[in-house]
Amino acid sequence: MPYLIDGDNLLWAWDFEGEIEQGRSLLLRILLKLQRKKRSKFIVFFDGPVKESIPSTENIRVIVSGTGVPADEMIRETLDSQHDCRSFILVSSDRELKSRAKIKRARVISSPEFIKILQRVVKKQEREIREYEVTPLEMRLWENLFRKRDFPDKKSRNFPIREKNEKK
């Protein structure tokens, strides 16, 4: 199911503080992680113009509206261009878009609900990263296990080692 995402609406609901370009970039990175999990396509709409071009991938298409054209209008056009939108999921809290999507039989997820989904993805990733971190205690245990032992002389070793010039 393709997701139609009202990107700026989602950032607004997220209470992202910082430059809009940074927020958009962060949002796209998190969406990429979610996309890998869900195996769905995402179409993300942003209001334009933008300072930098925002790259699309095979599964995340980014559409930036032109000057004077709101992204909401482009989402509306996308919904209206389809005969049956049952395969779409709209992510927005915009009342007019939600109403249009319901008329066209698309599923609707509000931005705050979708943010909860994104937060679970981020928390899961943080847990996975922590699982791979080695604690100081683990490091000491591994060092003790693999540390080279210093032997005072050859006779105290438990295994026979021949020197190069020794005879059999």
Image: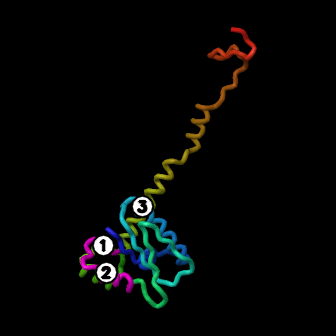
Rendered-image quadrant of the C terminus: top right
Nearest the eye: 86 or 156: 86
Q: Amino acid at mark 2?
A: Leu
**Residue placed under numbered mark 2 in the picture:** 79
> In this picture, which residue range is highlighted in magenta?
72-90
- Of labels 1 and 3, the one closer to you: 1
**Residue placed under numbered mark 3 in the picture:** 121
The disc, 3 or 2, on the residue closer to the chain's N-terminal end is: 2
| 37 lies left or right of 17 | left
Q: Position of residue 158 (x, y in %)?
A: 62, 16
- SS class, disc 1: loop
Which residue is located at x 57 percent, y 80 percent? 51
Please tell me in which quadrant of the rendered image residue 73 appears. Answer: bottom left
Inter-mark Cα distance, 1 to 2? 9 Å
**Residue placed under numbered mark 1 in the picture:** 88
The disc, 1 or 3, on the residue closer to the chain's N-terminal end is: 1
